[in-house]
Amino acid sequence: MYIKRVLFQITQPQRSSSVHSSLSSSMVVMTIRQDGTSFLSNSKPILCPDLDSDDLPPLPEIKSDDIRLQVYTHRSYFARPTHMFEDMPDDPSPDNEKLEHLGDSVLSLVVTSLMREEFPLVRVGPSTKMRALVVGNPTLADLSLKYRLPEKLRMHPAQAITLRVSTNIQADLFEAFVGGLYMDRGLEVVRAWLYPLLRPYLHDAYRHVRIQHGLPPEPPPHASPSPPAPPPASAHPEPPRTASSIGHLSLFNQHLQQQGKAIEWVWADSAGQGSRTTPIWVVRAMVDNACLGGGRGSTKKAAKNEAAKEGLRNLGIDVSCVHSDSYETRSASDGERGSSLAAQNARLVSASSL
């Protein structure tokens, strides 16, 4: 049942070879369901996984100065004509459009491979919808802002304010970075970075597509739809993950708060346990100078989750029935995420005006 529909007018710059970009507008209807979830009627749903800055894998380094410079160069910077069929052999285009084109294909390959591991039983039709959500402009623009990529973009000064806050340009820049990283360091480095980064977005896309097919956001407990398939031998090894780990951390915090005790998270030196692109975090949960549990993971939150799970066991609490936070709770934070993106765009506008 739908309880509210809100009409928006969205204005964004069109792609143009001229210095002065034109603006296009479109009407979007947001439909809010009774359970608090929402979707846009003439656009794809916006993915909102429960992520904070600690959950982001480090941005890999592009070692080639030439490739790195090209990644952050918008075509307006040189204002070359767009009607040419191909560049001259001694004067290839120096902007990031070809890297963006390459990055788009690399992203699709990585997301498709990740889907086969995470949801091997989902059919091709729903899988295509899931992939489209993960590699869509709203998702990639969100990631571009989280890594603050638009702040490094070189462009024509007359277009700086408009381009920096454009969702399309932010998404294009993320694709260009993926393409540049692939050219510089190869597919395995790209995969090692994108797998942990995109996994939460993929699971959120799975829930959205289930709703589109008239199913509940989460499968029934007795029929888990897609147990993760074992990764191929060449896949980058990762620490073990637990589907219900977020619930463990919440329960652990709640239990100790009820007892009036504080948790001190002590981070250990994890040198040599990970790689430059996928570090391993190691933490101990200390209560009254005693270690209740320890954990490790590819993000700080994952490590704390594992430590909380062990701590619950040591406290004699059954963790077999603990589940992750509900879809409704996660959806309630959509508005907060929108406010956060607006604040980031405002900061970019201020930087461009200086």
Image (cartoon, helix red, strand yellow):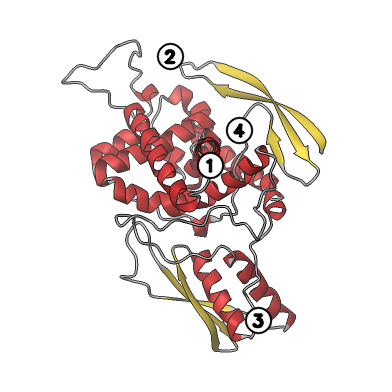
Q: Residues within 10 Å of mark 2 (few under 14, many from 20)?
A: few
Say which of marks 1 and 2 sits in front: 1
Question: Which element carries disc 2, helix, strand or loop?
Answer: loop
Q: Position of residue 172 (x, y in %)?
A: 44, 32
**Which of the pair 325/233 is nearer the observer?**
233
First in sequence: mark 3 or mark 1? 1
Residue on which disc 2 sits = 18
Please tell me how many numbered marks the rendered image carries: 4
Say which of marks 2 and 3 sits in front: 3
User: What residue is drawn where x is 70% and y is 40%?
Assistant: 214
**Which of the pair 316/116 is nearer the observer?**
116
Three-letter amino acid code of the residue under disc 1 = Asp
Q: Which mark is residue 128?
A: none
Residue on which disc 1 sits = 142
Three-letter amino acid code of the residue under disc 2 = Ser
Q: Residues within 10 Å of mark 1 (few under 14, many from 20)?
A: many
The quadrant where residue 280 appears: bottom left
Say which of marks 4 and 2 sits in front: 4
In space, the residues marked 1 and 4 are separated at their CA atoms by 14 Å
